[in-house]
Image: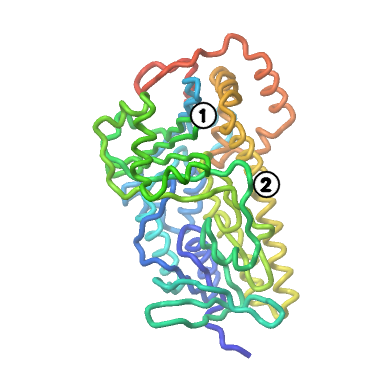
Amino acid sequence: MATHDAEVIVVGGGPAGAASAWFLARAGIDVLVVDRARFPRDKPCAEYLSPQASRILNEMGVLGAIEAAGAAQLSGMRVRAPNGVVIHGEFVSSHGFRGFRDCGLALPRRQLDALLLDRARHAGARVLEQSVVRDLARSGTGRVEGIDIETDAGRRTLRAPLVVGADGLRTVVGRRLGLTRTGRFPRRVAVVAHYGGVDGMGRCGEMHVDASGYLGLADVGHGMTNVAVVVPAAAARAIGGAPGDFLDQWIAGRPHLARRFAHARRLTTARATGPFNTRARRAWTPGCALVGDAAEFFDPFTGEGIYAALHGGELLTQYAFEAARAPTTRRHDIALAAYDRCLRHAFRGKRLVERIVGTAVAFPSLLDRTARVLAHRRDMADLLVGVTGDFVPPSEVLRPGFIVRLLAALAHPGAGVRGSETTPGEPVPGRLTNS
């Protein structure tokens, strides 16, 4: 029988991998985390943690350290539709739903990921950095038995009863297993960087949508603003080898944004990422499970990524524990199949809401009409903002009653709200403030 290097090998040291490792190590499992990078390292990401993510961070004992590191607090979201109508929602529900906190957090991934990985180490997980996973080690029947890695010292194989693929959007583990695929619509890519001196940044995250894509803005502390432009994948040629130029030109071409960047400067290297809309056919195969973006990532608009990664690691714990210590391969496979069902059930509603929102963003006229409605329907907007904050159940906006009311309002929007160019601090027509 082959000697094992750990009970569970986690590929990827980002939020999904660190959370998985922390929960498993706390449960007494011998965990080895393997990542190609040396931490701290930069990662293109919206860097937003929903209010409910704080619950998991608190359980991991890292919430205080994240706040002490200078994380910005986000009290809500502003969405500007192509017609200029702005919807403003706060992370305080008027429907009685409450999250772990009344605000979201934002911190550069360079700091966040290092803090999370340190917590995994503190729980007992071992971490192997600067190790590139080249392939999976498998038995004669195809069962995953470990990973083949390459380091400065050469190539070698690490073995474990269970491998967890937490290696993100372009997962090596998922691709080697033939589990992941990219959807045809919508297919988008992003360019992300930090800027200093962006005018008018407040405590809300912002989304600015037009016919060619959307731009997200969020304070991430330390006087920095996370700036992310998300465009159709066809624009990848225009991005080419100069994502920073593409980002600057995209902003400069929109007067309502350009004036806010008049005195701004880019502080970090602009990085491209995508395409999005990836999904695994299933989140397991004999000997291996997928978690976080490796299992599924649709689109950055609703800011789901980091919370889904943390919660996915939390959900995996029981099943990975059973699989790693299963006395038979049959029991191992039963545990991982149960994890797959649990994961899909936990995120089914939110994924559907994400797809509805993503479709609306792809059709400016539809988003314009929706914005006019939500600018007058505070109750409906409250629920949608709460769903993106992960503290309102998605079922609240998927109920037939809610859908019928929204469709009726879209069909008869009344006088609506006239589109207008607005900047922070100006009165916003139809603005919603939940307090």
Q: Residue furthest bottom?
A: 1
Report helix, strand or loop for mark 2.
helix
CA separation in Å, label 1 and label 2: 28 Å
Q: Nearer the viewer, mark 1 or mark 2?
A: 1
Closest to the observer, 173 or 384: 173
Query: Foreground: 163 or 115?
Result: 163
At mark 1, the secondary structure is loop
How far across and down, in percent of the image, does residue 94 sit?
Answer: 55, 27
Coordinates of residue 67 in the picture (x, y in percent):
35, 49
Q: Kindly give the residue lying farthest to the left in the view shown.
A: 263
In the image, residue 65 sits, relative to residue 360, either above or below, namely below
At 28% across and 42% down in the image, what residue appears? Answer: 266
Q: Residue sitting at 41 percent across and 33 percent down?
A: 204
Q: Identify the disc placed on residue 348.
A: 2
Q: Amino acid at mark 1?
A: Ala
Of the numbered discs in the image, which one, if any, rests on residue 211?
1
The N terminus lies in which quarter of the figure?
bottom right
For the residue marked with disc 2, what is the amino acid?
Arg
